[in-house]
Amino acid sequence: MIDYAKAISRRNFMKKAAVGAALVGSGAAARSAAKTKTAPLRLGGPTFEKYEGPDEWVGVVKKLGYRAAYCPVDANASDDVVKAYARAAKMADIIIAEVGAWSNPISPDDKTRREAQQKCRTQLALADRIGANCCVNISGSRSNRWEGPSPDNLTDETFDMIVETTRAIIDDVKPTRTYFTLEMMPWSYPDSADSYVQLLKAIDRKRFAVHLDPVNIVCSPQRYYSTGKLIRECFEKLGSNIKSCHGKDILLDPRLTTHLDEARPGLGGLDYAAFLKELSKMPDTPLMLEHLKGAEEYRLAAEHVRSVAKEIGLSFG
């Protein structure tokens, strides 16, 4: 004989248990979603408005909607000034992305080479003082044009020269808070993710890392029409070594033989959706706009990058 009172009681218990489990499950799902929610990306670029002091600088950066910035002081700044800017950036949640050391440390000209290597040391020291993500240069060129092609650039001898030079710069400065990095170039090492991996292993210094500008290695129609694949390969192979990125675009001209030109983001063929998706895996690695003319061009570039982020469910905060 069925005891209906007990049966109903059991059914009520099961219903309540199911509801409880659902609530627990939904809470766990919500917590899981919160954990996996992508943090805002960081965008930065040059500032054109004049400022005096760290507080005004922060205001200018924030007015542009940036959460990353180029280094606001030069190497001649006193320690007190450097510390004041570093403190203001930290308080405002602004990452100082990079300090440029643009020069030719492997120049065939002795004087140029010595001066370039000293500049790298000076700028790396500044990056360490202010706590920038990195100090960035290119490896240089064996031609008289610091960023130009040379038949000697992509040789074993030059690879070894880059290794020796980079080691010496890092060993002399001994940075503890920043990294020395080399941008990839189409005609100088590192010229690909693979050659960058080789340099990381050969240089073998904890404070040597990666600066990524994918446009610089889009040097053929084959790469131009597969920039998403190229970008994903860079992030897969270089990963957490990437400390800062440059944001620009590239346009393939239909003239023979092959003509590729830098362009404002949105006017070229770079797969920004792929770029931003990869960056979202390391949201404190900033994307820094560069090589544009004037504030309006940078505004349009930032607008495009933010619109792509929105389309794929990301944001720059």
Image (spheres, helix red, strand yellow):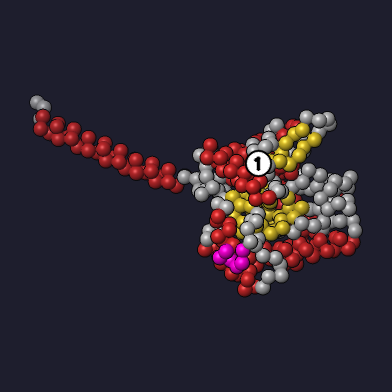
> Viewed as shown, does residue 155 lie left or right of 95?
right
Judge whether residue 280 can be spotted in this image: yes
The image position of residue 156, as x and y in percent, is 85, 48
Q: Secondary structure at mark 1?
A: loop
Left or right of 284? Residue 154 is right
Q: Is residue 176 visible?
A: no
Does the stretch in magenta take in 173?
A: no
Q: Quadrant of residue 7?
A: top left
> What percent of the width, then of the height, locates residue 167?
76, 60
Q: Residue at x 81, y 44 (%)?
A: 187
Vertical arrangement, residue 284 with respect to residue 266, above or below: below
Residue 125: image location, x then y, percent:
70, 66
Can residue 54 be found in the magenta stretch? yes
Query: Which amino acid type is shown beneath numbered disc 1?
Result: Pro
Q: Position of residue 17 (x, y in %)?
A: 24, 38
Q: Quadrant of residue 305?
A: top right
At x 68%, y 42%, the residue is: 264
Given residues 166 and 143, the one toward you in this image is 143
- Magenta-highlighted residues: 51-56
Task: Characterize the local packing of mark 1: few (<14), some (14-19) or many (20 or more) Cα atoms within 10 angstroms.
Answer: many
In the image, residue 1 sits, relative to residue 236, either above or below, namely above
Camera-side residue of 11 and 290: 290
Of residues 124 and 174, the one nearer the viewer is 124
At 72% from the left and 34% from the top, the residue drawn is: 224
Rendered-image quadrant of the N terminus = top left
Residue located farthest toward the top when viewing the structure as drawn? 1
Image point 86% across, 51% down: which residue? 145
The correct choice, above or below, for 125 with respect to 134 in the image is below
**Picture mark count:** 1
**Label 1 sits on residue:** 265
